[in-house]
Image (cartoon, helix red, strand yellow):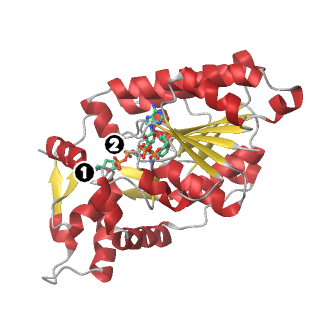
Amino acid sequence: MTILVTGSAGFIGANFVLDWLAINDEPVISLDKLTYAGNLQNLASLDNDERHTFVHGDIGDGELVDRLLKEYRPRAILNFAAESHVDRSIHGPEDFIQTNIVGTFRLLEAVRAYWNSLSEADAAAFRFLHISTDEVYGSLGPNDPAFRETNKYEPNSPYSASKAASDHLVRAYHHTYGLPVLTTNCSNNYGPYHFPEKLIPLVIHNALAGKPLPIYGDGQQIRDWLYVKDHCSAIRRVLEAGQLGETYNVGGWNEKANLDVVHTLCDILDQEKAREDGHSYREQITLVKDRPGHDRRYAMDATRLERELNWKPAETFETGIRKTVRWYLDNQDWVTNVTSDAYREWVGKHYA
Ligand code: NAD
Ligand code: DAU
C-alpha cells in the first residue's frame, strides 16, 4: 500500500505528508516540481525515512507520471500541486493555466490509463483526491450564507478560474470514465511552512524585519481561516470515507476581516517578541493599493463534512494563530532560506 502526493514540498502538501507519516506507516511517494513555492527543507525531517520517496518532476509530464504509477502502484493519489498565489496569477496567469489546468489534465490522463490497468478489486479501492479551494465559488455579500457544495462556480481571478477548470476536469473524469475521484474545497489555511508571500506569514516576517505590513484597500475583506493540520485531517477523512464523485467543503467557521487578523498577529508578537523600542507592531500597518478584482468575502459551510464524515477542526483561530506565530519565531532559519533572491525580486515588484 502506497500513496502518491503531488505538490508535497509546498505548504499544505508538506504538512499533509509529515502528518501522514507521523500517524501511520503507509509509504508516500512525493512528486513536486520545486517551483519557488516548493521547498525540500519542508520535508527535511524525512530525509532518512525509508517510507518517503521524493521525486522531482512535473504533474504535466505524462511519461514521468506513467513510470511512477507503474513502478510504485499507489492505491491513491492526492493532488496538491498547483500555482496557488492570487497576486501572482494577476501579474502572470500563464503558469496557472499550465499547471492547474493542463497539468491536472495530463495527470488525469496518466491516472486513467493506470486505473484501467488495475485488477477489478484494486480499481474499486483506488482513489484520486483533488485538493481545491473556496475561491471557485466567487465572492459573498455581507449577509449571504456561507458557500455550500451546491453553490455555482463563479471564479474571479485567473488563479480561481484555473482551479475551477481543474475541478471540472476531475468531475468529468468521474462522470465520463468512472474514475473514482473525490474533491475537497477548502478555505484559507495558515500554519507552519506557509510561504511568506501570503498574508499571515508575510505580516509575521515583515513585522520582525521592521518593514511595513501591507493591507490591501480598506482591510475589511473577509477570509475564513483554518489551521493547516485541520485541513490535512479533513483530507484524510475524505480519502477514507468520502463518497465517490462528490465534493466536500472544508472550513473552520472562522470568518475574520484582514485588518483584524493583522491586529491579532501584532498583538501576539507584542507579547511573544516585543519590539526593542517598546512600541506595538501595529504601528507598521500600512494601507496599500487594493488587489484588482479583490473578492470581498469567503465563508465555507462545512456541514456536509461534519455530518456525513464526522469531521471537526481541532484548533480554534485563537489557538492556531498563536501556534503559528510561535512556529515562525522558532523557525527563523526556514524563513531566511525561503526568502531568496527570487522572493525579494517578487516582493520588490509587487509592493513597489
Ligand atoms: P503552495 O504554492 O505552497 O505549494 C504548491 C506546491 O506545488 C509547490 O511545492 C510547488 O513546487 C508544487 N508545484 C507547482 N507546480 C507543479 C507542477 N506542475 N508539478 C508538480 N508540482 C508542482 O500551495 P499550497 O498553499 O500548499 O496549496 C496546495 C493546494 O491546496 C493547491 O492546489 C491550492 O489550490 C489548494 N488550496 C490552498 C489553500 C491555501 O490557503 N493555501 C486553501 C485551499 C486550497
Ligand atoms: O481561500 C483559499 C485561498 O486562500 C487559496 O485557494 C489560495 O491558494 C491562497 O493563497 C489563499 O488566497 P487569498 O488571496 O485569500 O490569500 P492571501 O494570503 O494572498 O490574502 C489573504 C487576504 O489578505 C486577501 O484578502 C488579500 C489580503 N492581503 C494579502 C497580502 C499578500 C493583503 O491585504 N495584503 C497582502 O500583502
Which picture quadrant has residue 112? Answer: top right
Residue 213 position, x and y percent, is: 20, 59
Q: Which of the image's four quarters has the C terminus? A: top left
289 or 220: which is nearer to us? 289
Residue 340 bears which disc, if any? 1
In-image side of 346 versus 134 (left or right): left
**Residue located at (88% from left, 31% from top):** 121
Residue 36 bears which disc, if any? 2
**Residue located at (15% from left, 58% from top):** 286
Which picture quadrant has residue 76? Answer: top right
Task: Name the N-terminal-most of marks 1 and 2.
Answer: 2
Q: Secondary structure at mark 2?
A: loop
Does residue 315 sit above or below 301 in this rendering? below
In-image side of 27 versus 80 (left or right): right
Which picture quadrant has residue 185? Answer: top right
Q: Tags 1 and 2 in contact by the CB under 8 Å rule?
A: yes
Residue 317 position, x and y percent, is: 48, 66
**Residue located at (61% from left, 66% from top):** 314
278 or 329: which is nearer to us? 329
* Res. 253 visible in picture: no
Amino acid type, callout 2:
Tyr
* Res. 244 visible in picture: yes
Say if disc 2 is inside 8 Å of ligand 1: yes
Amino acid type, callout 1:
Ser
**Residue located at (39% from left, 32% from top):** 159
The residues tagged by marks 1 and 2 sit, at their Cα atoms, a distance apart of 9 Å
Q: Which of the image's four quarters has the N terminus? A: top right
